[in-house]
Amino acid sequence: MPTFDHTDLLLPPEPGQRALARELYALAAEQPIISPHGHVDPALLAEDRPFPDPAQLLIVPDHYLTRMLLSQGVPPSDLGVPTRDGSPVETDGRVIWRRFAAHWHLFRGTPSRLWLEQTFRTVFGVHTPLGPATADTLYDEIAARLAEPDFRPRALFERFHIEVLATTESPLDDLGQHAKLAADGWGGPGGRVVTTFRPDDVVDMEFEGWSTNVERLGERAGEDTGTYAGYLAALRARRAAFIAAGATSSDHGHPTARTLDLTPEEAERLYDRGRRGQADAADAEAFRAHMLMEFARMSLDDGLVMQLHPGAVRNHNRWLHARHGRDVGGDVPQATEYVHALAPLLERYGNDPRLRVVLYTLDEDTFTRELAPLAGGYAALLLGAPWWFLDSPEVLRRFREAVTESAGFYNTTGFVDDTRAFCSIPVRHDVARRVDAGFLARLVAEHRLPMDEAAETIVDLAYRLPRRVFKFGGVDQ
């Protein structure tokens, strides 16, 4: 049996706390999944085609996996990751799977192993342990499941008990897949699959092709983006289109959390420099910082929840980016400052309860020192779950320990899976629910929280909080 095939997975080892945690986890486990931020391709559900072979489904698109093998000298092309120049890559799923299985030992102790083994067991009902000797057996078992109608994307969506799944699209996207979902009764306001407004490629002057993207934004919105005023009008128009397609939030993946409140004249001068190709790195940072203020103002008008995901140094592995492009494992975290960076935005809008800013971090050193006190002191600010490099049982535990004293549970948002791997969604939410059950069980065992309140809290964390924070119950949530 796989190492992690145990009903008490991640629950406390102390018998008394484990018994309490079992009761709490049972309450959380029966709740529907709210997935308010992620990167699943909406075409997956709009087209509802059978999944490809096990390697194409589980290995090729998962940069957590391909990144680890790259660190040991296995190039992504050997695992089927497409190249930018069209140079050859491995396309035989069984060869990719065998190559991955030969390096399975690299994942000992990692959340990637935990997620993948739980996916094998709970999604596919496969209990064969992965390794070089069992690679073909496991591949064949999963391939057989993928051929069944019950393993089509929409059927799995229902089995996963997902109530709402939010995808993430650029303002340049025509939202055609979401239109198809809406036509099928799956999308639109109140639908099961909604979009999220992610404007980084038209805001960040350092984004490849930014100026061209701004032109395309104007064409998509029917506005003249040759002027700063027209640019803002185009962004507002696209936000309205996203809201019509079911969006309840925007998302901003800036290198830092800096905010800056420029005058319209100052912002227009920055914008013009960028459009002429004369902006430097300082200009790009100032423009990103100012646009967070603009987006906060827009959110007050249109009600979108504002998510901020700062702290990633994008494409740090330049060879990987040059050969394979973005989002294939070449990014790394950096130290991120929040107290001074967010001060302009919080000074102007932080006490306005109409605004919701969900703040994430890749720098867990800031949990206690900065993030929890900020979220515990401003009506507009909420803390998102640990994400990306921090999405692990250990950090999820440390997050609760670090932020609860200053921010409590109700200035956090519940779990956010942030995944591209559709089949990992229920597994990642299950891990978070188990960790929260263990944390709450400890509070009960220490006589710091009555069991009935702990039971109410774990249902809030698993379901009610993300549903309310991200307005999946309506704009008045």
Image (tube, grey):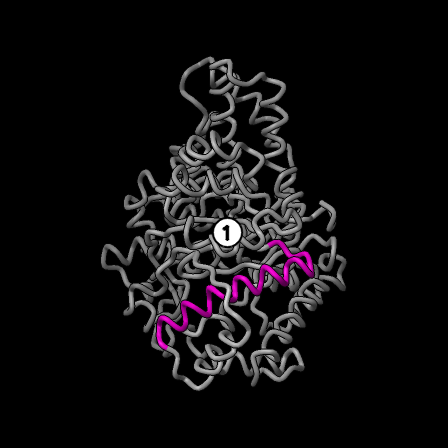
In depth, the one of 50 and 74 nearer the eye is 74
Q: Examine the rendered structure and indicate whether residue 324 appears above or below residue 130.
A: below
Q: Quadrant of the C terminus?
A: top right
Snapshot quadrant of residue 5: top left
Snapshot quadrant of residue 264: bottom right
- Report the residue at 60% width, 74% height from top: 232
Q: Examine the rendered structure and indicate whether residue 471 appears above or below residue 432.
A: below
- Report the residue at 45% width, 29% height from top: 9
Q: Is residue 315 left or right of residue 399?
A: left
Q: Examine the rendered structure and indicate whether residue 446 appears above or below residue 62.
A: above
Q: Position of residue 241 (x, y in %)?
A: 69, 68
> Is residue 292 one of those drawn in magenta?
yes
> Can residue 285 be seen here?
yes
User: Residue at label 1?
Assistant: 418
Q: Position of residue 255 (x, y in %)?
A: 40, 61
Secondary structure, magenta segment, majority class: helix
In depth, the one of 150 and 208 nearer the eye is 208
> Can residue 123 be seen here?
no
In depth, the one of 353 and 96 nearer the eye is 353
- Report the residue at 64% width, 32% height from top: 30
Disc 1 marks which amino acid? Asp
Packing grade of label 1 (10 A; few <14, some 14-19, many >=20) is: many
Total number of numbered discs in the rendering: 1
Bounds of the magenta span?
A: 280-305
Q: Position of residue 413 (x, y in %)?
A: 57, 42
Q: Position of residue 124 (x, y in %)?
A: 53, 44
Q: Quadrant of the N terminus?
A: top left
Snapshot quadrant of residue 368: top left
- Classify mark 1: helix, strand or loop: loop
> Is residue 60 one of those drawn in magenta?
no
